[in-house]
Image (tube, rainbow, N blue to C red):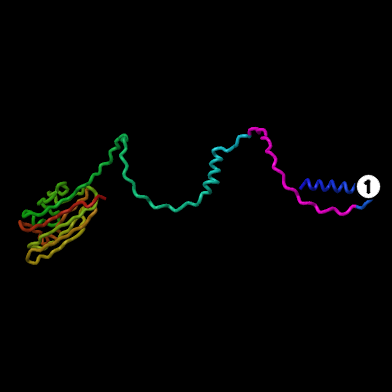
């Protein structure tokens, strides 16, 4: 122990002094004794004086958010794959208020659809018509727009467009040769040679007409080719109508 070392040192010094005074030579120091046991712990010291108040920290809302983001939430990971669509929700309730009625729009352009059609035939009085002149069909089957004139035998176009014309002929007693004529130009011809009984002949074409153009059916080749016939049981007809305006 500490006290042991001190006593040994004092004894050594006394021995050296005595030896020096007697003229003797000192021997080697002895082996140090065992250390002594630790003494009892001392009492706690008194509390120190209270220190000055420290400066206010700078931990604002923004720094708190950054701290939480970096230390709690961690770094934002990559965008994940889109999930499947959920089920369609129920239809919501109608709103409480209705919007104001807007102003009435301007009236649009009225679409006008042109109409033009006729269908006429020969009668017992007009069979075997004169050659080289418009055939005057006097049996009116349909002529609501009056675009066909039975006095002249001509159809007059009132709306430019594509028209379809057709004719059906009963042939009796003579040959037949007729032409579909537009403004004096022969467009198509139909011929039938009489064989001693009633024959049938027909023709038709699509024509483009401008307003004022005229179309009619006409016997060509003279009276030997005007065998167009009609009675109570047989008909010869001429018809036409507008397909579309153009």
48 is higher (above) or lower (below) than 158: above
The structure residue drawn at horizontal position 14% and vertical position 48%, both measured from the top left corner, is 143
Q: Residue at x 17, y 50 (%)?
A: 117
Side of 145 where 104 appears, left or right: right
Q: Is residue 184 magenta?
A: no
- The secondary element bearing badge 1 is classed as helix
| 40 inside magenta stretch | yes
- Picture coordinates of residue 198, whole percent (x, y): 8, 63
Q: Nearer the viewer, residue 166 or 62?
A: 62
* Res 174 seen here: yes
Horizontally, residue 95 falls left or right of residue 31, namely left
Where does residue 230 sit, x and y in percent of width and height?
Answer: 7, 57
The rendered magenta stretch, by its main secondary structure, is classed as loop
Q: Position of residue 216 (x, y in %)?
A: 17, 54
- State the image coordinates of residue 92 (x, y, percent, origin top left): 32, 42
* Residue closer to the observer: 3 or 96: 3
Residue stretch rendered in magenta on the structure: 26-53
Mark 1 crowdedness (10 Å alpha carbons): few <14, some 14-19, many ≥20: few
Query: What residue is disc 1 on?
Result: 21
- Residue located at (17% from left, 57% from top): 166
Determine if residue 102 is in view. no
Residue furthest bottom in the image: 195
Decide: is 59 above or below 138.
Answer: above
């Amino acid at each position: 122990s500490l006290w042991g070392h001190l006593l040994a040192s004092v004894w050594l010094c006394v021995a050296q002094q005595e030896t020096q005074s007697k003229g003797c030579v000192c021997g080697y120091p002895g082996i140090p004794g065992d250390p002594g046991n630790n003494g009892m712990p001392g009492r706690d010291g008194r509390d120190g004086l209270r220190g000055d108040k420290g400066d206010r920290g700078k931990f604002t809302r923004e720094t708190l958010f950054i701290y939480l983001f970096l230390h709690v939430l961690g770094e934002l990971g990559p965008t994940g794959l889109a999930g499947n669509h959920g089920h369609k929700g129920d239809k919501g309730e109608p709103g409480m208020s209705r919007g104001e009625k807007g102003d009435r729009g301007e009236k649009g352009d009225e679409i006008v659809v042109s109409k033009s059609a006729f269908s006429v035939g020969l009668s017992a009085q007009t069979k075997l018509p004169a050659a080289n002149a418009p055939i005057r069909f006097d049996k009116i089957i349909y002529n609501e727009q009056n675009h066909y004139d039975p006095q002249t035998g001509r159809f007059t176009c009132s709306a430019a467009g594509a028209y379809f014309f057709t004719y059906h002929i009963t042939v009796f007693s003579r040959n037949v040769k007729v032409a579909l004529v537009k403004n004096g130009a022969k467009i198509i011809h139909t011929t039938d040679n009489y064989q001693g009984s009633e024959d049938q002949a027909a023709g038709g074409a699509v024509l483009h007409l401008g307003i004022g153009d005229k179309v009619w059916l006409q016997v060509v080749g003279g009276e030997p080719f005007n065998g167009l016939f009609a009675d109570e049981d047989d008909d010869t007809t001429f018809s036409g109508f507008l397909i579309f305006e153009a």
